[in-house]
Amino acid sequence: MHRLLFLAAIAFTSAFPALAQSTPEVLILGSYHMANPGRDLHNVEADDVLSARRQREIAELIGVLHRFRPTKVAVEVHVRDRTIAERYARYRAGGYQLTRNETDQIGLRLAKDLEHAAVHPVDEDGEFPYLRLLNYAKANGLQARFDSIQAAVAAVVAADNEFLRGHTILEMLTRMNTDEAAARGMAGYYAYVPFGEPWEYAGPELLARWFERNIKIYRNIRALATFPGDRILVVMGAGHLGWLRQNVANDPSVRLRTIAELLDRPR
């Protein structure tokens, strides 16, 4: 029955192209953390985004994001955080200096450029039972396998660090937002699925908790699609990229967009 409804929806939108074109669009922009908060297990080491060189590069990035013509800008700030509205209001009035955080450098700056009345916090908390997973690995002779997974992730981050030093912010984010990078980020979590057994699903529980957090974030993003022609740009840490893209792609009520598409457009 559900399949028949889905096929009927496809046939309906095919018959009425204007309706298909009005489907809300979502672009997830995965970013490194520009302020170096060090909250992740492995972190890109960002240089000073407030330097003259990096500020020119931020302006270049913002110019590319303008091509998406976002109607709403969402940021990685807790959905119940009320301070983001006050910060943005002060910024629009000229009374707030942007920090190094990508929420400010990309989210607030883009929203102001587009004369939006607000930016939209969409983040949500979630459990991340990493120590439970580590203890399971230690107790079951899987420490070496666990360490090899961590080493593989560290190697990817080291390569990102090296790339950032010699490239622009736009080039860095283009690299971090490829289909391959998104898939690799998800695969790293699936590597932990074998770390468990009946009654002690340490690896699967970590994966489930991470998925749970991201589906809640997606709910908050999806709630912003209140008009048929909405175009929602979401600035999130790159670790969320694959999971949020997957949620958008699996939701027939919205259309997934990527930064790669914007680079193919004329200015």
Image (spheres, rainbow, N blue to C red):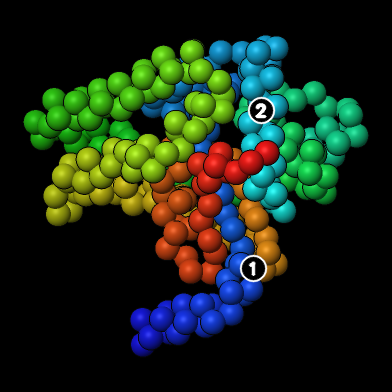
- Secondary structure category for the residue under label 1: loop
Q: Which residue is mark 2?
A: 60
Mark 2 neighbour density, 10 Å: few (under 14) some (14–19) many (20 or more): some
**Above or below — where is 96 with respect to 210?**
above
> Label 2 to label 1, Cα distance in Å?
28 Å
Q: Quadrant of residue 58?
A: top right
Q: Quadrant of the N terminus?
A: bottom left
Residue 211 is marked as none
Residue type for callout 2: Glu
Provide residue 69's location: percent of width, then percent of height: 70, 49
**Above or below — where is 138 with respect to 56?**
below
Q: Nearer the viewer, residue 179 or 34?
A: 179
**Above or below — where is 162 with respect to 204?**
above
Q: Which residue is mark 1?
A: 22
Q: Quadrant of the C terminus?
A: top right
**Above or below — where is 139 with respect to 169?**
below
Say whether residue 235 is left or right of residue 69. Answer: left
The residue at the point 68 percent across, 64 percent down is: 229
Provide residue 174's location: percent of width, then percent of height: 49, 33
